[in-house]
Every structure is written in structure tokens, then in C-alpha cells.
């Protein structure tokens, strides 16, 4: 480890961290937002489910470096445009999240939905006040997976010339300079950890009924959640 | 969209199939190294995963390992190992095996865990030894998820091997790297199409194998009919997805 290099390049490292954050945060958020209506549709109809999940798994099959090259062709952007990386990462995020979201809505017990309808909830109320809150545990699990893999896959952007922490890896290889690669890995793991803490804290704040029981899926308390309380 | 047509024409151009290290050579190299890595990963992860699933111990450690491996950037791991061991097959194989173990591990333990406890108790009551239970009851019943894990592993390895071409490895990624270096978009696109096609074909073959190998009546879909439909469908993809990542 060359600590002097780290000391004298703190600005560069900080800049790459910011670039990495700016490139990875939007795909995670957009992926979550897009997957909720898609996942809901998939949980309501078998046909929608099989179509959406097949498309999702085919998109997930495309290798990251190939997708990074395909996106500019499809969107008509310049290859060095960082938006390519954000778009490619969003595709992966949605591909993974659609399945989680479909499972999340399917995990809401039918009886609860029937009760909500029986007490007079409209469809829209039922979705926002009953189904969405009860789907949070599984949605959260999915988005945590998405966030970790997004942070790590983003580094591949270095191969197509989009600067972020992954650039340290290609530089390290070209200059035979190990320290740079280690700095890159440590920063990426740290960002993944920070995102994960933020997501799990947010999830806990959104699920006050769930604080004492970590194993939400097995816990009956999910079903007796204070339904009106969350809005 | 015309670029796609040009890329397909590039792939079909006989000149790219005959001279020197051609498409078929890179394809074989890609397949060979991927196969090797998947085999090593299966040899390590399958016994460990089955042991975790059978004993119910070490599940937390398995999940932890999977999560860390998911966060590790392949490109970074490759550059570090290549700087340490030099350019060659060894660092590439090591990185891909590290990457391939988590999905295989998850598929194995999720598969064995998914076997109905009553079935295992029944096998034990019939006087089967633990080994017989593992080999004749748990593994056959776990096959759908086991092969699901294998498919995820193969996909992961084939897709990621493309990155290794940035570090002086042949394989199909070479067209991506050369295309980028020469700003030759057609070659770039051709490389992307070739890798994606290979991944899809291998996945399709494994899916077909899954249908042939899995004993009739074990197919996971069966639970759809006996359980309340929503809940049963929910449990299947979640377990599979754990294997997918």
C-alpha cells in the first residue's frame, strides 16, 4: 500500500466517490419507482407476470459490458455520455426489482385485502394504505440486493471510458499500481455498506410495527399492522 | 437500428470465421473457460450448500458470503489478482470462481431446505441412513432449485468473462475491447450480441436439461395447485431469486 499516493490524491478519490454516487443513486431510486407499478401488475395477472418476469430475466442476461455498449446505440447518445451508465444500471435495477415487487405484492395475504375491501376501502385507498405498506418488507429486501449490485456493476463503466471508482481499476492495471485498485475496492464496498444502512434504516422507519421482529415474513404482526397509521 | 443489421452482417462475414483467432476460436475459449469456472464453483459450492441445507447450520454465513461477493466489483478483483499473479488464466479463473460460488451455494441450500420435513422424517423412519436421505431424497427433490442455481451461475460467469478481455484474455469480450479501442461500433455491437446470444443459448439448454432431469412430480409448479395460488407463487420466485443473484 502506498499511503503517500492516497494522501496526495484525496481530491481525486473524493471526486471519483462523488461521481460514483451520482451515477448509482438514480438507477436505484428509478428502479424502485418503476418496479412498483410493474410488480403490482405482475401480481394481479398471470399473463402480465410471465411476460414481465421473462423480459426481466432476459434483460438480466445481457452482460453489463454489452449492455453499456448497446444503450448508446438504442438511445442515440454518445458512447462517453455518463447517462449511458445510469440507463444501463436502471435496466438491471428494474430487471431485478420487478420480480421482487411482484413477490412483494403477492406476499400480502388475500384475507387482509378482502377485509380492507369489506370495510369500505376504495381500490386506490386499498393500494396505498394496505397493499403498499404490507409489501415493504419484500420490496426492501429486493432494493437492498439491487443497491449492492448497482454499486459494484457501475465500475464496469470504466471500460467504456465513463469515470467513477472503477476507473481506478483500469488505471491500476495500466500502471501496475496495486494501491489504486485497493482504494477503488474499499470505496465501492464502503458505498455499498452506506447505501445498505440507509435503506434498512428507511425501511425500519417505514415499518414501525415491525421494529421488534426482524423476521417479518414469519411474523403475524405484519398482518395486524396499524393500517391507517402509516399515512 | 441499422447498426444492428450491420453488426449481424459483421458476425456472419466469413472473413471473421476463418482467419487466425476467429469468432469460433474466441467462442470456444469463452465456453471452455466459463465451463471450467462453473465446474470448480459447483465442486465447491454444491457440497457446502447441501451440507448447510441438510444440517440447517451455517445459513447465516452462507448469506453473508453471498452478500459480500455481490458487492465485490469483478473488475477490481481482476485487476488486483492480475497485478499480484501476472496476466494469465489463473487470476481470471479465481475471480470467476469467487463470483460463481454464491449463486450456486444459494441454489443448493435453498433447494435442500425447500424439501418437505415430513418427507425427510418419513425417509428416516424407513431406515434410510443420512447419506441415503441426502442422495436419494433431498437432492432429487431439490433439483429444480439446484439447477436454477446452476443456470444463474453459468449466466453470471459467461457474462462476466467478457470483462476479462480487458486484461489480455481472448474470449468473446475481445470484440468489445477492440471495438472500443478502435471506435468501431459495429464490432462492438457484434461482440455484445455474441456474448448475449451465448448466454441465452446456454441458459436455454440448461432450462431444457432441467425439464429432462427433474423427476416428474417434483417440478415446483405442483405446489401451485395444492396451495392457495398467490402464496405458492410467491414462495417460488423468492427462493429462485436468491439463487439468481
Image (cartoon, rainbow, N blue to C red):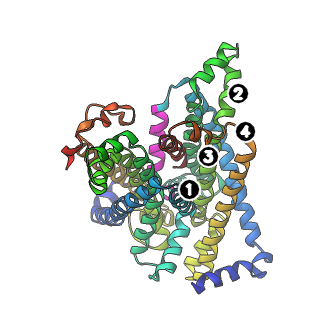
As rendered, which of A81 and B84 lies closer to the eye? A81
Residue A203 to residue B135: above or below: below
- Mark pair 4, 3: CA separation: 17 Å
Q: Nearer the viewer, residue A12 or A56?
A: A56
Per the rendering, the mark at residue B216 is: 4
The answer to whether the residues at label 4 and label 3 have Cβ atoms under 8 Å apart is no
Visible residue check, residue A130: yes
- Circle 3 Cα neighbour tier, 10 Å, few/some/many (<14 / 14–19 / ≥20): many
Mark 1 vs mark 3: tell me if same chain: yes
Labels 1 and 4: the sequence-earlier one: 1
Tag 4 subunit: B
Point out the residue furthest to the right here. Answer: B18
Query: Is there one chain holding both mark 3 and mark 2?
Result: yes
Residue B128 magenta: no
Q: Which mark is residue A202?
A: none
Question: Is the C-beta separation of discs 3 and 2 under 8 Å?
Answer: no
Subunit of label 1 = B
What residue sits right under mark 1 in the picture?
B82
Q: Nearer the viewer, mark 4 or mark 2?
A: 4
- Label 3 belongs to which residue? B148
Amino acid at each position: 500500500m502506498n499511503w503517500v499516493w492516497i494522501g496526495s490524491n484525496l481530491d481525486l478519490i473524493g471526486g471519483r466517490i462523488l461521481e460514483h454516487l451520482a451515477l448509482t443513486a438514480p438507477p436505484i431510486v428509478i428502479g424502485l419507482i418503476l418496479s412498483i407499478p410493474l410488480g403490482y401488475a405482475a401480481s394481479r395477472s398471470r399473463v402480465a407476470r410471465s411476460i414481465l418476469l421473462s423480459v426481466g430475466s432476459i434483460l438480466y442476461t445481457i452482460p453489463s459490458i454489452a449492455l453499456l455498449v448497446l444503450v448508446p446505440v438504442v438511445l442515440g447518445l454518445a458512447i462517453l455520455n455518463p447517462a449511458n451508465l445510469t440507463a444501463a444500471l436502471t435496466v438491471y435495477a428494474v430487471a431485478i426489482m420487478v420480480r421482487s415487487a411482484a413477490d412483494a405484492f403477492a406476499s400480502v395475504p388475500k384475507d387482509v385485502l378482502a377485509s380492507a375491501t369489506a370495510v369500505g376501502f376504495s381500490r386506490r385507498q386499498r393500494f396505498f394504505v394496505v397493499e403498499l405498506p404490507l409489501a415493504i418488507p419484500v420490496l426492501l429486501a429486493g432494493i437492498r440486493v439491487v443497491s449492492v449490485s448497482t454499486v459494484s456493476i457501475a465500475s464496469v463503466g470504466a471500460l467504456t471510458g465513463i469515470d467513477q471508482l472503477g476507473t481506478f481499476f483500469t488505471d491500476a492495471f495500466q500502471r501496475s499500481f496495486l494501491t489504486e485498485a485497493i482504494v477503488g475496492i474499499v470505496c465501492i464496498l464502503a458505498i455499498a455498506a452506506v447505501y445498505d444502512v440507509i435503506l434498512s434504516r428507511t425501511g425500519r422507519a417505514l415499518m414501525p410495527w415491525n421494529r421488534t421482529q426482524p423476521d417479518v415474513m414469519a411474523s403475524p404482526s405484519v398482518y395486524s399492522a396499524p393500517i391507517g397509521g402509516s399515512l | 437500428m441499422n447498426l444492428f443489421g450491420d453488426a449481424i452482417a459483421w458476425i456472419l462475414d466469413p472473413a471473421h470465421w476463418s482467419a487466425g483467432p476467429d469468432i469460433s476460436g474466441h467462442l470456444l475459449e469463452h465456453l471452455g473457460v466459463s465451463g471450467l469456472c462453473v465446474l470448480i464453483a459447483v465442486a465447491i459450492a454444491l457440497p457446502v450448500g447441501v451440507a448447510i441445507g441438510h444440517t440447517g447450520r451455517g445459513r447465516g454465513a452462507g448469506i453473508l458470503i453471498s452478500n459480500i461477493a455481490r458487492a465485490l466489483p469483478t473488475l477490481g478483483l481482476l485487476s488486483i489478482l492480475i497485478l499480484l499473479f501476472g496476466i494469465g488464466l489463473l487470476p481470471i479463473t479465481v475471480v470467476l470462481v469467487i463470483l460463481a460460488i454464491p449463486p450456486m451455494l444459494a441454489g443448493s441450500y435453498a433447494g435442500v431446505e425447500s424439501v418437505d420435513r415430513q418427507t425427510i422424517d418419513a425417509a428416516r423412519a424407513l431406515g434410510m441412513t443420512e447419506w441415503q436421505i441426502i442422495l436419494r431424497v433431498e437432492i432429487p427433490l431439490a433439483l429444480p432449485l439446484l439447477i436454477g442455481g446452476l443456470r444463474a451461475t453459468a449466466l453470471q460467469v459467461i457474462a462476466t468473462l467478457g470483462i476479462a478481455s480487458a486484461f489480455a484474455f481472448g474470449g468473446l469480450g475481445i470484440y468489445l475491447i477492440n471495438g472500443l479501442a478502435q471506435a468501431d461500433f459495429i464490432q462492438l455491437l457484434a461482440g455484445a450480441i455474441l456474448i448475449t446470444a451465448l448466454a441465452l443459448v446456454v441458459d436455454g439448454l440448461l432450462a431444457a436439461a432441467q425439464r429432462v432431469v427433474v423427476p416428474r412430480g417434483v417440478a415446483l409448479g405442483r405446489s401451485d395447485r395444492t396451495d392457495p395460488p398467490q402464496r405458492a407463487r410467491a414462495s417460488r420466485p423468492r427462493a429462485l431469486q436468491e439463487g439468481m443473484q
